[in-house]
Image (tube, rainbow, N blue to C red):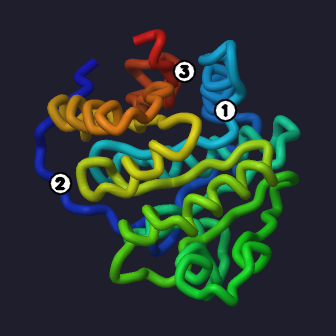
Amino acid sequence: MKLFKKKKRELDTNSMEKGVYLVTVAKPSSVNMEQFNTIRTNIEFSSVDKTFRSIVMTSATASEGKSTVAANMAVSFARQGKRVLLVDADLRRPTINATFAISNPTGLTNFLTEHKTSVNDIFYKTSVEGLYVLPSGPVPPNPSELIGSKRMEKLIYSLQEAFDLVIYDAPPVLSVTDAQILATKVDGTILTVRENVAEKEHVRRAVNLIEHVHGELIGTILNDVNSDEAGYYGYYGKTASEK
């Protein structure tokens, strides 16, 4: 199996316009659903001393499927009976409003820039029992400043108290600093690596950048695996301790 590839590719904007595919909702009995459940279990057992209450999902570069993985992981955790919040922290290329068909959403940007906006105004209940989403809101001119603000830090801590698990869908690590900033404020970070798209040096640099800010890298999720080569499996999760 050839994991890394250096072929140039165009930036995929399809997920921004149409959302990501929720295989965990469309095909709840599929093998892919079982793979997300396996990843969920790996995350839960990756630390014996603490329970992860907040996680950042990111990737080294764009179009590696981190929004798809984040949304489907959120469904998997919610179906376990947890109260889960999926936050669209990718303020530049949001997907959650399209994925969950929320038109003109008030979201994270509104809360961070408009003090009259309450936290209760910015998250939405989904059709999946126990799953809530927090859209990004309007695209701001200064996303990194907002993500790194004191108001954002307070929001992270308050959401962590209100939900069993908060999953942040963050921008790629090598593109902007947002994921690094979030990694310092949450319990753990997971890197999505897409087969035949990810470049080895990019993944290495992304890991180094997360570790540089002392973020806890829980592990990686290998995405979009060729089913012929991976047997039954399209997704494969691996914790840091198994690398």
Label 1 sits on residue: 52
Q: Does 43 appear above or below 178?
A: above
Which one is earlier in the sequence, the residue at label 3 or at label 1?
A: 1
Q: Given contact means CB atoms under 8 Å apart, are the residues at marks 1 and 2 in contact?
A: no
Which one is earlier in the sequence, the residue at label 3 or at label 2?
A: 2
Q: Residue at x 26, y 26 (%)?
A: 3
User: Does 232 sit left or right of 181 as displayed?
Assistant: right
Disc 3: CA contacts within 10 A as few (<14), some (14-19) or many (>=20): few
Q: Residue at x 72, y 56 (%)?
A: 159
Secondary structure beneath dot 3 equals loop
Of marks 3 and 1, the one in the foreground: 1
Q: Given contact means CB atoms under 8 Å apart, are the residues at marks 3 and 1 in contact?
A: no
Which one is earlier in the sequence, the residue at label 1 or at label 2?
A: 2
Is residue 17 visible from the viewing direction of this image? Answer: yes
Label 3 sits on residue: 232
Quick one: which residue is furthest to the top in this view?
Answer: 242
Q: Given contact means CB atoms under 8 Å apart, are the residues at marks 3 and 2 in contact?
A: no
User: Does 220 sit left or right of 72 as displayed?
Assistant: left
Q: Based on the displayed image, in which of its 4 quarters is residue 133 positioned?
A: bottom right
Q: CA distance from mark 3 to mark 2?
A: 27 Å
Label 2 sits on residue: 9
Near-viewer residue (222 or 153) = 153
Q: Does 88 appear above or below 207?
A: below
Q: Position of residue 11 (x, y in %)?
A: 25, 62
Labelled disc at residue 138: none
Label 2 amino acid?
Arg
Near-viewer residue (183 or 39) = 183
Quadrant location of the N terminus? top left
Of marks 1 and 2, the one in the foreground: 1
User: Does 153 sit left or right of 198 as displayed?
Assistant: right
Q: Position of residue 189 (x, y in %)?
A: 48, 37
